[in-house]
Amino acid sequence: MQLLDIGANLCHESFHPDLDAVLQRAHTHGVGRMIVTGASRDSSRQALVLARAHPGKLFATAGVHPHHAIDYDDATDALLRELSRDASVLAIGETGLDYNRNYSPREVQLQVFERQLQIAVDMHMPLFLHQRDAHADFIALLRRYRDKVPAAVVHCFTDGGEALRDYLALDCHIGITGWICDERRGTHLRELVHEIPANRLMIETDAPYLLPRTVRPQPAHRRNEPMYLKHICEEIARDRGEQVADTAANSTATAEAFFGLAPLP
């Protein structure tokens, strides 16, 4: 079983002391490749540094999360364009809208989201997208650019059926995390994953966040790791009525096609 984690925040400070051990545990659990999420100026730089240090195993995205939109300026835009020229950077993002926390004003989020959409258009790169409590504005802006970019994935999908069908109608990919394992707020996803075509479904941990609540035993530190992608895959397979091997093979092949990666031998 070869798994590909499309979203891991390995630049997070919690991974600084033991990243090599984290990567080894991931490999032991069948996670051979990971996409390191760039979510700010600094983490986008760091994601590329990690990808260069682990060629063939780690890759990167370059973007600014809506929480950090207030810090986006022309220098940031130029940096993302520069980073995106590196062969290890496979998508623009994490970018989008987040009206749940509003750490950045909504009008600023919209402006910054559109600037990054334009980068994806100019560089002809896929989009790695974030949306929370902002679906109407998000889908309206995405519709204007979707046919100008090669692909787009709504990362860490947690929304409802209407939003899912809107994204699928735009030929978007869907990233499912351990949120599906949360009996308090993720049970609706167990039904919705049936609606995602196999060639649009990708899986991710969003580590160190969203430790699957069904993992046993639960680690005392509560940190999510890419090693738990196998558990997420097993849960999704059960909910889709598939063999785990099929869900693993299909999600990996879908991710390889999306990010332009060759299959592993």
Image: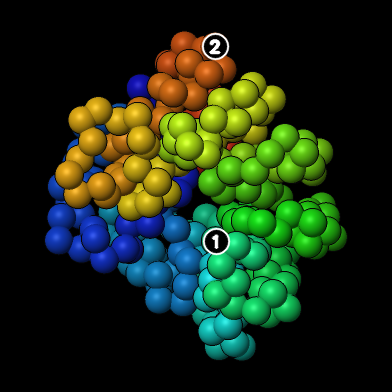
Q: Which residue is mark 1?
A: 94
Q: CA distance from mark 1 to mark 2?
A: 31 Å
Q: Position of residue 265 (x, y in %)?
A: 37, 27
Q: Is residue 133 above or below residue 46?
A: above
Q: Position of residue 232 (x, y in %)?
A: 41, 30
Q: Compare marks 1 and 2 and give the one earlier in the sequence.
A: 1
Within 10 Å of disc 1 (Cα), the crowding (few <14, some 14-19, many 20+) is many
Could you tell me which quadrant the N terminus lies in? top left
Identity of the residue drawn at 68% across and 48% down: 151
Within 10 Å of disc 2 (Cα), the crowding (few <14, some 14-19, many 20+) is few
Identity of the residue drawn at 40% across and 70% down: 43
**Which quadrant of the figure has residue 106?**
bottom right
- Mark in the foreground, 1 or 2: 2
Q: Which residue is mark 2?
A: 241
Q: Is label 1 in a helix, a strand or a loop?
A: strand
Identity of the residue drawn at 20% across and 40% down: 219
- Nearer to me, 60 or 217: 217
Q: Position of residue 71 (x, y in %)?
A: 54, 84
Q: Position of residue 218 (x, y in %)?
A: 23, 36
